[in-house]
Image (cartoon, grey):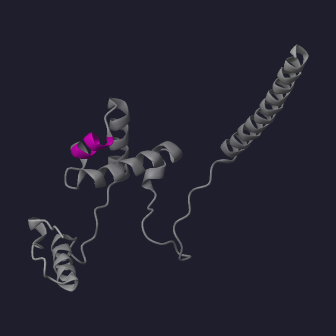
Amino acid sequence: MYCTPKLGLLNKKSTIKERGAFLMEEKKKSGRPRGKISQKYSPEFKQEVVEYRIENKIGFKEAARRFLDHVPPCTGCAYILKWERIYLEEGPEGLAIERRGRSRNGGRPSKLKLKPEIEKDLIERIQNLEMENEYLKKLKALVSKREQQAKRKLK
């Protein structure tokens, strides 16, 4: 068994229980202090970050380094990715909605419903695509049938 010196687990004879206890102590040291409330960002800040990223065509990591330098880049990327998805789906007003925690009925917060005209347009588009798909299937079957008949005539 090879362990890294960083974790202090070089002793091959140490038990699994001792290794687990050491790792738990390390986790306690590096974790968020108990009782500390996590950072809350304003809707204006979120909108500014998303719009800056879109306008300047920079990546998520670069935006995280520029705006969220106090958190690890991978965490900042996740924040910005989520904010951008909300911004594109619901618009700037969607960034103001608090999504953390549980709702009053005990479950996770539900997603917002689409506007009726948008939902109607999407349903219509789905139906058109399904009809087109059926047409193409029938056309493909017809073409393959004609090709088979042409092969039979040549023989």
Residue at the spot 87% in from the left edge and 21% down from the top edge: 146
Residue at the spot 39% in from the left edge and 48% down from the top edge: 81
Labels in figure, total: 0
Q: Which residues are magenta?
A: 60-65
Q: Quadrant of the C terminus?
A: top right
Q: Is residue 59 left or right of residue 124?
A: left
- Percent from the top left, x then y, of residue 44? 35, 47
Residue projecting furthest to the top: 154
- Asked whether residue 115 is drawn in magenta, I would say no
Principal secondary structure, stretch drawn in magenta:
helix
Q: Quadrant of the N terminus?
A: bottom left
Residue at the spot 12% in from the left edge and 73% down from the top edge: 9
Between 83 and 92, the one lying in front of the other is: 83
Above or below, 134 against 96 in this view is: above
- Percent from the top left, x then y, of residue 96? 43, 54
Between 55 and 154, the one lying in front of the other is: 154
